[in-house]
Amino acid sequence: MIIHAALLSKTGGRKVNEDFCCYDEKSGFGCYILADGLGGHKGGALASRTIGEAVIEAFTASPGFSAIKLIEYVEYARRSFLAARIETHEHKSMKATLVLLLTDGHSALWGHIGDSRLYYFHAGNLLFQTKDHSVPQLLADSGEIKEDQIRFHEDRNRLTAAFDGEELVRFTIPEKPVELNSGDAFLLCSDGFWEYLTEPEMVSVLKRADKSEQWLAEMENMLLDRAETGHDNYSALAVIIE
């Protein structure tokens, strides 16, 4: 299998970009990560960058593919994050969301905490999406609101879990890897991206996109047509399997 990846990360209508996304591909393995620093906590940009760079550093030093490896990379990031939080006392309350994809080109695993999302597309359809660790997601799970009402719910920024350097008991991973097929695709994105695009629209653009870059570019155009003045940072990382 050949992996085609592309990313974008923009400030949007804010002064500082607190999102961070990056990836590395080495020895037949790929590691793709997106983090979103929480705007209500000082040091959001530092938080997301610390997590992203630490995960990639751990992956680059020991590339591999397994649930154990995924947790190993995240645990290294947790320790690095905690050290950075201690060193920069003014940012002791910094937090971030995290979504991480790991693949060997034949199978894939992922994990997340917070409300940055991973979408998995198979055979031209959305097969899976992560569930936010947020108050609106709890309301949707209990049937009090519909899933699509999460996007602009008044409490959409109230998270029930985030990456803060403490124990990652809420970090969520699937029970087993998924086997990949040609045409499968993944989209990792922050809430500033997914709140302006519906899942059917993501599928529709994917079906006519030739490359990961085109998929992202068309979705970004749709986002910018809808975004309000002063809208949030937005970031996305697209991975297509061929």
Image (tube, rainbow, N blue to C red):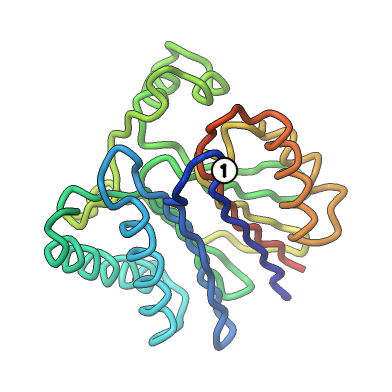
| Residue at (39, 71) in percent of width and height | 53
The quarter of the image holding the N terminus is bottom right
46 vs 184, left or right, is left
x and y percentages locating residue 47 in the rendered image: 31, 57
| 12 and 217: which is toward the camera | 12
Q: Amino acid at mark 1?
A: Gly
* Residue 229 showing in the rendered view: yes
Instruction: State the SS at label 1.
Output: loop
206 vs 9, left or right, is right
| 116 and 175: which is toward the camera | 116
| Residue at (44, 14) in percent of width and height | 143
123 vs 93, left or right, is right
Dot 1: few (<14), some (14–19), or many (≥20) neighbours within 10 Å?
A: many
* Residue 175 showing in the rendered view: no
Q: Which residue is mark 1?
A: 12
x and y percentages locating residue 83 in the rendered image: 16, 68
| 97 and 47: which is toward the camera | 47
x and y percentages locating residue 224 in the rendered image: 69, 37
87 vs 219, left or right, is left
Seen in the picture, residue 94 relative to 177 is either above or below; the reply is above
| Residue at (47, 75) in percent of width and height | 65
Seen in the picture, residue 108 relative to 62 is either above or below; the reply is above
* Quadrant of residue 85 within the rendered picture: bottom left
